[in-house]
Amino acid sequence: MKPKLKTATAAVISMLMGTTAVAEGLKIGVVVTLSGPPAALGQQIVDGFQLALEQKGGKLGGQAVELIVEDDELKPDVALLKATSLIERDEVDIVVGTVFSNMLQAIFKPIVESETFLISPNAGPSTFAGRNCNPYFFVTSYQNNQNAEVSGMVANEEGFENVFVMAPNYQAGRDNVEGFSKTFKGNVTDVVFTPLGHQDFSAELARMSTSDADAVFTFMPGGMGVRLVGQFNDAGLKDSMKFMSVFTTDETTLPGQKDAAVGFLAAGNWAPDMANDANTAFVSAFEAKYGYIPGGYAMQAYDTANLIDSAVAATGGSLEDKDAFRAALKAADFTSVRGEFSFNKNHYPVQDFHALTIVKRDDGKFHTSFVRTVVEDYADSFASECQM
Amino acid sequence: MSLTLFLILCLNGLQYGLLLFLIAAGLTLVFGVMGFINLAHGVQYMVGAYLVFAFTGLTGSFWLALVLSLIAALMIGLLMEYAVFRHLYARPHLDQVLATFGIIIFLNELAKVLFGPATLSIDTPELLSGSIQITEQLRYPVYRLATIGAGLVVAVGLFITISYTRTGMLIRAGSTTPEMVSALGVNITQLFRIVFGVGAMLAGFAGVIAAPLFAIEPGMGDNLLIVAFVVIIIGGVGSIGGAFLAAILVGLIDTLGRSLVTELLGLAVDASMANQIGPALASMLIYILMAAILVFRPKGLWPAKGVA
């Protein structure tokens, strides 16, 4: 190659590279669980995010978005690898993830230390809500303990005196038991921990029947919830005690639980039939596109995309000034489908929580349904420890 | 703990044990007779559950679906034997582990692609959907009793086949001295194929009867496979009787342990401590039993005759 030509080529290359750098765009990495039994949760997040993106013509805040979706396989080492490749190789501007708190723990440090914004559409561990809160970390879902705490309030309102509590034997299970016990004023008859992925609940159901409890509170996400609800029903306990739960009877498990779950109580920050215009539009658009009723996971991802949209628009499409972008995110100047939404000083949401119940819709599909608001503008109990 | 509760726990333990037996029976024969480590055996359980889900959807009848699923499970077992496993018999155990592990991943993902990642369920068949009122609040589903019956029938049938029929005799002979059986003019490959197909069908059958009780999801057989290996080690590799005995033992210990260990610990240490240790200890019990068996009776409780 002649020297002159070489220079010319180099010039062309640098010009090309120059153009890509100038062409303002937004690179967003998504790290969620898309394999194994909990894949349905990660899929909801991807679907919810993409719906919002599509509604805005593939742009957020006027910037064309390149979305890179990664599967953490529910393995901390894989999550870490995917997250580091997102920030180092793909040089994404924002990472959205994860479904599970233990995956978030794995990816948290490298992302925030690279001064990349990390927004969690579901996991909300207490670890990063208090003293270890971080300027680059936002949560659009809830703080993990809150749903169980609200369940305790629901139990008080329903007038339950004796409650049988059961959860899988791992961190989130124990957190939920603690959250429930914190707000429930009555008597907890038994606390039973089962192995994670438990198959046969008949022994626990037998204990339940002899416990004289008037309700059971449980946290059995995914397949465990499907099995528990079916077996609870088969054992005939539905007639003698109330069933109250978090993340056990939701839109990801109801297609498997069907009629057995109708009338069961739950607590949460949203239900698909909550009456506001933004929500109605979201749910019908989501169902039309994906053919299933969205759950909280999809809703939170949809809100996350809208939050990013509002913040990018507020800073005029630039993420160069990180402080300005952070302030724009914190302002939460978007229409959340759950109604009022704002960020606390630890960047966890302040929002209303509701009592929910399971209903069968006229077309034979099942979903959680809004009953009443239990607590308004509910903030988590760790925010006071956050220095930010 | 009341007597009723104890009896219920025993029934549940028995039911879990028989389910384990259906899976372990095929595993112990394939492992014992052919010396072949088939990790993909647990995935047959999942295949059975998905088959009955699909066929119930198509035909609308659980019983028709049961028959179709068994035939399909047998076919899938034979197909896997023909396509993959027969090339591995002469290979070292590590190759077998790798190849069969690959099949687990493949079939788990296939289930997800075909049926989606969400957990599915099917209704118990109409005929067995009733329940027996055992205490004021608690009912025991007839279907669970039926699975105990089905498990026992299969166990007796297998035992008679292995002990008293010509095929059973050949299987027993083939497990100890395959070359000699082959020299006497028996098609040993054919024999192994039958053992393999029936083993796969039994695991499929376990999946079919478990489907209405437990939910159907990708990877549902993976945990059971580990327990099934524990069962065949406790019972003695290659021994149907041993597998039966060990399966019932493991089923009872696991089910009773989960309720009793925490309560018993509660007598010794304070309640919150017991609640911390109890569940963890309860899930370790069967492995502790296996370790003890390996130390004191390395051939298992009821070893197959002639195993060196």
Image (tube, coloured by chain):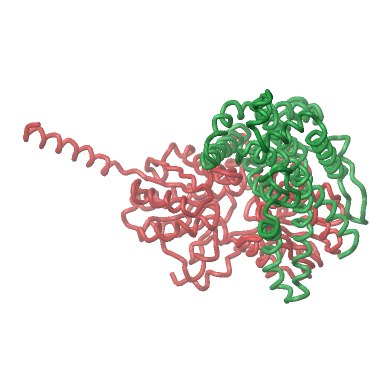
Picture layout, residue B7 above or below residue A379: above
Point out residue B162 in the picture as x, y percentages from the top left corner: 78, 35
Which of the pair B47/B304 is nearer the observer?
Answer: B304
Q: Is residue A226 left or right of residue A232?
A: left
Picture layout, residue A382 above or below residue B222: below
Residue extending furthest left? A3
Q: Which residue is drawn at 55% across and 70% down?
A: A382
Query: What is the letter of the red chain?
Result: A
Which of the pair A1/A298 is nearer the observer?
Answer: A1
Which of the pair A174/B15 is nearer the observer?
Answer: B15
Number of marks = 0
Is residue A267 visible in this depiction of the protein?
no
Point out residue A305 in the picture as x, y percentages from the top left corner: 48, 47
Q: Residue at x 53, y 37 (%)?
A: B99
Is residue A127 visible in this depiction of the protein?
yes
* Quarter of the rendering containing residue B58: top right
Q: Residue at x 61, y 29 (%)?
A: B81
Query: Chain B's colour?
Result: green
Q: In this view, does B286 lie to the left or right of A81?
A: right
Q: Is residue A386 left or right of residue B31?
A: left
Image quarter hosting the N terminus of chain B? bottom right
Point out residue A19 in the picture as x, y percentages from the top left corner: 24, 39
Q: Which residue is drawn at 67% across and 32% down?
A: B196
Point out residue B26 in the picture as x, y percentages from the top left corner: 70, 38
Q: Is residue B118 left or right of residue A71?
A: right
Picture layout, residue B63 above or below residue A10: above
